[in-house]
Amino acid sequence: MTTAPTELHILLVEDDEGDYLITKALLDKARTVKATLDWVSTYEEGREALLTDVYDACLVDYRLGAKTGLDLLTEVNEMGGVEAPIIFLTGQGDVEVDLHAMEAGAADYLSKEQIDAPLLERSLRYAVERNEAEQRIREQARLLDKARDAILAHDMGGEIVYWNKGAERLTGWTKEEILGDRMHKCLYDPDEEDKLRRCRETMMEEGEWTGELHMRTNEGEELVVESRWTLVRDASGAPDQVLVINTDVTERKQLESQFLRSQRMESIGRLVGGIAHDLSNLLMPIRLGVKVLRRRLQQTDDKIEQVLNMIRKSAERGGDMVEQVLAFARGMEGERVALHLDGIVEEIHGITDETFPESITVHTDVSEDLPQVVGDATQIQQVLMNLCVNARDAMPEGGTLTLDAQPVTLTEADAERNIDAEPGEHACIRVRDTGTGMPDDVMDKIFEPFYSTKEEGEGTGLGLSTAYSIVQSHDGFIDVDSEPGQGTQFRVYLPVSTEEQERRAAPGTSDGAATGSGERVLVVDDEDFILETAREALFDAGYRVHTASGAEAALTVVGEQAVDVVVTDLRMPEMDGFDLIRTLRAQHPNLPIVAASGVADGRTDEALDAGADAFLAKPFSAETLQSTLHEALHADEAPAQ
């Protein structure tokens, strides 16, 4: 089968017309090349024609009047060069000229005395094919440089022989700085030696390896990369080089870690929320029962009074712990108003300056243009106080505690780096210490409830988990950076308020001992012991009490008997307290209703929106229950003018 000749557009720069005619005749005899020949006869014309860069190959006479073809090639290269291969023609062979021509970038050097049609044809074909191959290689190299991945190659001794632009961008090392260096020495963390050894063994056995490695940048920053190693063999099949493609997954790993932590926190939150609900139900009869026992016992036995006080205080401490657990589970509810953080930061400064050891220096720095946020001042103060106490404990030998607050604008890219973040204007409060710092495995768990690095009995492990949930309930998030021996920095981000905003707060829960006057109270709960203790406590306080062990039973009672006020739990099987409140409100618009729950989790507002007049967080005391009932029953009584 005959192959069609290759069509080539050729430029000839030749000042001798006779040599032009000879060259044209030789090309006409070519079998594998079909040439279209353009001829120019001067140095200047040759320069202009070469710079058009429209030719497949160029034949250039070495002698061009006062100048040479080598001068022409040098000048053209300085002006940007040409893609086409250049073949020099000369009247006589000269090895030194030949070498200079090759150094300048000539593809070949032919003597006019020895040239014939096959030689010229072969030189042109090889020059064009070689130039096309080089162009393909250059294009591939350009594509590799455009890749976001770091692509490198090293020989079997570990010496780097190729380094693309992606590798420069990722690591900060330029090609000139890195080529010739040993890869293991400058690129990877020393702790990765064992993993690198296993990687090499796997690659030698299977031809490739894929896994995660920790790299170091020129600035010493640590990166996590997904690394793919491929063994490259030479023509004889012997191992020659290793091609490595590294993809930066540092940000992805951080987001994965945050997502897993968020999932874990959510699961733990549901768990502790349920436990807190059960604890609330267990503690409430104790608190109510103390009131009943004190009223029922007529004798004034100091020992009995001491025991009752002990029971009451223990129940109150248990209730406080339940509140802490709930603060983690639901982020705590409270009054949401527009706040200026500078006053809160100054309050914290005053407290820490007065109570922390003298070996700890406290600094504050609040931006003058710090915007206001929407939140509960007491809760935000609790967050900062928890962070400051942790900072104090991390500096047993003393150090510096710094609180500063600055306005921050989070972009979409910033928000993508933290699973809880939203783009927009924020106020950022930083709490920094110069203490012992934390390793990564500790930082991953610090926001979990009951996790503590302190000695047993020195902390509940609820401080940071509570802070985390409070900040989340304010639609913000917490970031932390720490390094062993280098201190820790917490950053609390709170979204900026665009207007004066406010949420309803739970009604007052004064412990005033309000009593009843025979009002009929319906208590609804699915726990019998709560119904019994509530009945006794309210009976002793002057109320007439009905009980119902569920929502359906409560509707029956209300349908059959007159009721002045209803106290209902929210978490009940089948029909829950919310549906009961809505049904009662529809049937009896003026009936006072008090909602109660051991797990608030946003239920204060939900219960009030459903139609409740007040909300009680379990466990509550008899005094709190009586006070809330009194307020609900007499809410419509206008104050004297």
Image: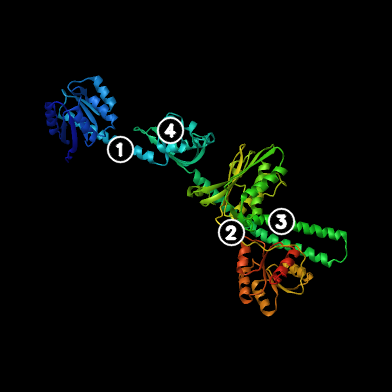
User: Which mark's residue is nearer the viewer, 2 or 4?
Assistant: 2
Residue that label 4 marks: 174
Mark positioned earlier in the residue sequence (2 or 4) = 4
Please indicate, yes or no, whether residue 59 appears anywhere in the rendered image.
Answer: no
Residue 125: x and y in percent read 21, 33
Kind of residue at disc 2: Gln
Mark positioned earlier in the residue sequence (1 or 4) = 1
Residue 397 versus residue 153: which sits nearer the camera?
Answer: 397
Residue that label 1 marks: 136
Please indicate, yes or no, whether residue 143 appears anywhere in the rendered image.
Answer: yes
Kind of residue at disc 4: Thr
Determine the CA span between mark 4 and mark 3.
60 Å
Q: Point out the image quarter for the N terminus.
A: top left
**Residue at 13 percent of width and 31 percent of height:** 24
Determine the CA span between mark 1 and mark 4.
24 Å
Disc 3 on helix, strand or loop? Answer: helix
Residue that label 2 marks: 501
Disc 2 on helix, strand or loop? Answer: loop
User: Which mark's residue is nearer the viewer, 1 or 3?
Assistant: 3
User: Which mark's residue is nearer the viewer, 3 or 2?
Assistant: 2
Mark positioned earlier in the residue sequence (4 or 3) = 4
Residue that label 3 marks: 320
